[in-house]
């Protein structure tokens, strides 16, 4: 009997960057995974790869011109938008990221992307300076907050001769991410998840404070991933220059003591608690009531007192069935320190990383982590923080299932 099941459909947007030729390989990989692919190209993309190439590979006409008369009577960009189960743009240039973030639809690709209700997967590729610019980073944050998925960019030698972040992510990785989005996990339906993220600020005087380099990106990635998987997510966030993920409950904190109060009040109601925040270990014993002035070269001494241990406090109140996940950002004896924290704070899983490693430190979109439980240790390679978030939740859910089987 013939299988008449409908193939999943990806609309593949190709923009005008040197990495456009890699979209041909991505198309073939998607087809090998049983996915039907329709291609939309910008005019600049056509200067790198001829539309005929994509037509031959896909077996479908390639859409390039909003005003070109279609072969059949239908508004082409709307028809493609409705057909898509997933909209992938690879490569995604700085130009198209800016257009999508600002709601500009002035060609076939951007009008189709604006009209679709399908998930959006973006694979940026550009010069390192462009990728690291404030404008591009803000646009990426805006798109992520609206629910767009970002894969890459990778780091390496670029076509312009520079080396650094900006290289199109490996097409195997993009294809795997696309397939995962077409068959999303919903294994956290109905679960209540608390995620803490970002740094604390401990005031010294009305102007200054003690803090750390945490950006909040890892915690925000975990919150996004848990929400996608069906959880009811509460994000307890310190001061972070990030747009909160859509459809999560945001609860702000500033100091470690505020984090402690909020976290211990919320945690007992939660099924999973992921503590990615970086609370300060110390605070000023006394906060000056007015701005501390220079003293003509005289040294300033600050007397600090230890802050409460938030993770230990949550662990002390752990209830049966809860899964507690902690983080250990270390510079020395990473595994030893992380394993000690796992036991001391009554955690089920701790995510350890050496923040001195390239790509695993602060203010980057990648991480290199080791997942440690009482039973085993699993080291993961360099990957995006979004992918790391998925792997962390995979491990947390596996622990939950193991516990349920033993109960």
Image: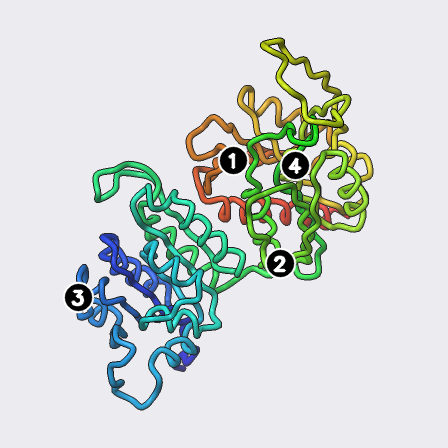
Query: SS at mark 4?
Result: strand
Using the numbered discs, state the Cα–Cα distance from disc 4 to disc 1 in whole angstroms: 12 Å
Distance, label 2 to label 4, CA atoms, is 21 Å
Disc 2: CA contacts within 10 A as few (<14), some (14-19) or many (>=20): some
Q: Are marks 3 and 1 in contact (CB under 8 Å)?
A: no
The x, y position of residue 168, in whole percent, is: 32, 49
Q: Which residue is rendered at x = 35% and y = 84% of the image? A: 75
Helix, strand, or loop for circle 2? Answer: loop
Q: Which residue is mark 2?
A: 187
Q: Is tag 2's residue or tag 1's residue first in the polypeptide sequence?
A: 2
Q: Is residue 389 above or below residue 335?
A: below
* Residue hosting label 3: 50
Q: Of residues 260 and 345, which is closer to you in this image?
A: 260
Labels 3 and 2: the sequence-earlier one? 3
Closest to the camera, between mark 4 and mark 3, is 3
Mark 1, other Cα within 10 Å: few <14 / some 14–19 / many ≥20: many
Q: Secondary structure at mark 1?
A: loop
Vertical placement of residue 391 versus 368, above or below = below
**Vertical arrangement, residue 4 with respect to residue 118, above or below:** below
Residue 312, quarter of picture: top right
Residue 8 on image: x %, y % = 42, 71
**Which mark is in front, 3 or 2?**
3
Marks 2/1 in contact by CB < 8 Å: the verdict is: no
Q: CA distance from mark 3 to mark 1?
A: 41 Å
Q: Which mark is residue 241?
A: none
Q: Nearer the viewer, mark 2 or mark 1?
A: 1
Label at residue 369: 1
Closer to the chain start, of discs 2 and 4, is 2
The image quarter in which residue 56 lies: bottom left
| Residue hosting label 4 | 326
């Amino acid at each position: 009997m013939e299988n008449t099941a409908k193939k999943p459909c990806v609309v593949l947007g190709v923009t005008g960057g040197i990495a456009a030729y890699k979209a041909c390989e991505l198309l073939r990989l998607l087809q090998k995974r049983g996915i039907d692919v329709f291609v939309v190209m910008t005019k600049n993309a056509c200067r790198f790869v001829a539309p005929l190439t994509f037509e031959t590979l896909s077996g479908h006409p390639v859409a390039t011109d909003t005003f070109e008369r279609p072969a059949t009577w239908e508004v082409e960009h709307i028809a493609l938008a409705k057909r898509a189960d997933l909209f992938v743009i690879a490569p995604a240039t700085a130009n198209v990221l800016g257009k999508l973030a600002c709601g500009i639809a002035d060609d076939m690709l951007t009008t189709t992307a604006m009209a679709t209700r399908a998930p959006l997967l973006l694979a940026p590729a550009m010069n390192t300076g462009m990728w690291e610019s404030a404008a591009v980073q803000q646009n990426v944050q805006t798109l992520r907050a609206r629910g767009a998925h970002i894969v890459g960019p990778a780091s390496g030698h670029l076509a312009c001769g520079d080396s650094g972040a900006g290289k199109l992510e490996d097409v195997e990785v993009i294809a795997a991410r696309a397939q995962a989005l077409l068959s999303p996990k919903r294994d956290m339906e109905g679960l209540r998840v608390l995620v803490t993220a970002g740094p604390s600020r401990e005031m010294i005087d009305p102007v200054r404070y003690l803090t750390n380099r945490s950006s909040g990106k890892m915690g925000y990635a975990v919150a996004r991933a848990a929400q996608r998987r069906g959880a009811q997510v509460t994000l307890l966030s310190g001061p972070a220059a990030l747009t909160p993920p859509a459809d999560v409950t945001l609860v702000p904190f500033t100091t470690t003591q505020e984090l402690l109060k909020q976290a211990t009040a919320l945690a007992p109601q939660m099924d999973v608690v992921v503590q990615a925040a970086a609370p300060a270990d110390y605070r000023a014993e006394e906060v000056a009531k007015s701005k501390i002035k220079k003293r003509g070269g005289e040294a300033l001494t600050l007397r600090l007192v230890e802050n409460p241990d938030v993770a230990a406090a949550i662990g002390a109140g752990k209830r049966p069935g809860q899964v507690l996940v902690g983080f250990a950002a270390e510079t020395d004896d990473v595994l030893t320190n992380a394993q000690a924290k796992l036991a001391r704070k009554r955690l089920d899983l701790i995510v350890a990383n050496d923040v001195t490693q390239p790509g695993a430190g602060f203010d980057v979109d990648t991480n290199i982590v080791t997942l440690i439980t009482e039973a085993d240790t699993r080291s993961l390679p360099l990957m995006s923080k979004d992918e790391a978030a998925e792997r962390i939740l995979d491990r947390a859910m596996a622990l939950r299932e193991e516990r349920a089987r033993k109960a």
